[in-house]
Image (cartoon, helix red, strand yellow):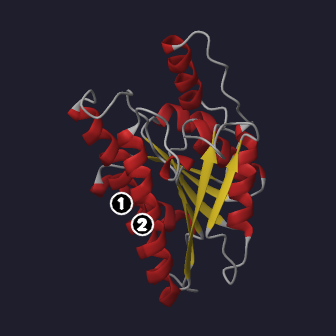
């Protein structure tokens, strides 16, 4: 049975990915802070492993990965997904606590999960595995008034490249998926904010979150001799090409 840990598994893209992998028969580690929600997702899925942890807590992250490997035997894939989008504004309007929170979750959390996943994959037999980082099209073309999110997601792209390079010696592949406007609570909230600022604005174009999950499944299902380095999957009519 193939194995995967999904961070940020309690909602949005992470939850959709976790549920899809469970339906496909994978052993899935559900990592997020809200244990009650994880228990709900795991119900009726004996192959689910609940890993209640905060991705910004180094000790909690390491304990969660160690617990998963002890129960599942190995870690084939990490979907490194947990992230937040804080209140918008120009850089002088952004609260410093929002900047620090964005860096702590979107970058430090990604680093800590990747670090624990890389170590597990490096020392297991047979050696190797795959890390899939959830980036964002914001790493290339940001939304207005989103400096913390755009900056941290750009940093994730650098992390992906470094992991890809450093993982070659250990048969560890790393790729990144950049998702645009999947219908998640975060994207819906961004849409509400935009309409509040400009009630005459057109509603944003979105796509089903399950389509993003299917893209992650494709990346994860590849043999380790093949890798999707970067994938962009987005709502067809959203203003990305030509935006700005």
Placement of 70 over or under 126, stated as above or below = above
Image quarter hosting the N terminus: bottom right
Residue 111 place in picture, x, y as percent: 37, 61
Neighbour tally class for label 2: few under 14, some 14-19, many 20 plus, Cα within 10 Å: some
Regarding residue 120, the answer to whether it shows in the image is no
Distance, label 1 to label 2, CA atoms, is 11 Å
Q: Look at the numbered disc 2 and give the secondary structure of its residue.
A: helix
Residue found at x 47% / y 46%? 82
Residue found at x 59% / y 53%? 178
Placement of 117 over or under 95, stated as above or below = below
Placement of 169 over or under 63, stated as above or below = below
- State left or right for residue 77 relative to residue 167: right
Q: Which mark is residue 159?
A: 2
Residue found at x 54% / y 38%? 10
Instruction: Specify the farthest residue to the bottom.
Output: 169
- State left or right for residue 2 relative to residue 61: right
Residue 238 place in picture, x, y as percent: 69, 36
Q: Look at the numbered disc 1 and give the secondary structure of its residue.
A: helix
Image quarter hosting the C terminus: top right
Instruction: Specify the farthest residue to the left.
Output: 96
Which residue has dot 1 on it? Answer: 112
Image quadrant assignment for residue 230 = bottom right
Neighbour tally class for label 1: few under 14, some 14-19, many 20 plus, Cα within 10 Å: many
Residue 203 place in picture, x, y as percent: 67, 20
Residue 60 place in picture, x, y as percent: 33, 53
Residue closer to the observer: 169 or 232: 232
Residue closer to the observer: 5 or 240: 240
Placement of 134 over or under 52, stated as above or below = below
> How many numbered marks have been drawn onto this rendered protein structure?
2
- State left or right for residue 141 relative to residue 66: right
Residue found at x 48% / y 67%? 160
Does label 1 or label 2 sit earlier along the sequence?
1
């Amino acid at each position: 049975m193939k194995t995967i840990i999904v961070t940020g598994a309690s909602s949005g893209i992470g939850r959709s990915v976790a549920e899809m992998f469970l339906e496909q028969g994978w052993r899935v580690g559900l990592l997020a802070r809200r244990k009650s929600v994880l228990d709900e997702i795991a119900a009726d899925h004996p192959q689910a492993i609940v890993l209640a942890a905060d991705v910004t807590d180094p000790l909690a992250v390491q304990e969660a990965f160690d617990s998963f490997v002890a129960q599942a035997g190995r870690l084939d894939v990490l979907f490194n997904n947990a992230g937040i989008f804080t209140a918008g504004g120009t850089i002088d309007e952004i609260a410093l606590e929002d900047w620090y929170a964005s860096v702590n979750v979107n970058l430090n959390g990604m680093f800590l999960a990747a670090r624990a996943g890389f170590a597990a994959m490096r020392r297991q037999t047979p050696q190797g595995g795959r890390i899939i980082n959830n980036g964002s099209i914001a790493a290339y073309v940001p939304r207005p008034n989103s400096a913390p999110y755009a900056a941290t997601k750009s940093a994730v792209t650098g992390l992906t490249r470094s992991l890809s390079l450093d993982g070659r010696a250990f048969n560890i592949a790393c790729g990144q998926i950049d998702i645009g406007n999947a219908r998640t609570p975060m994207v819906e909230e961004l849409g509400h904010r935009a309409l509040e600022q400009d009630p005459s604005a057109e509603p944003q174009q979105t796509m089903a979150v399950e389509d993003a999950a299917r893209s992650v499944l494709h990346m994860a299902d590849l043999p380790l001799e093949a890798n999707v380095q970067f994938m962009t999957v987005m709502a067809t009519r959203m203003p990305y090409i030509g935006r700005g």
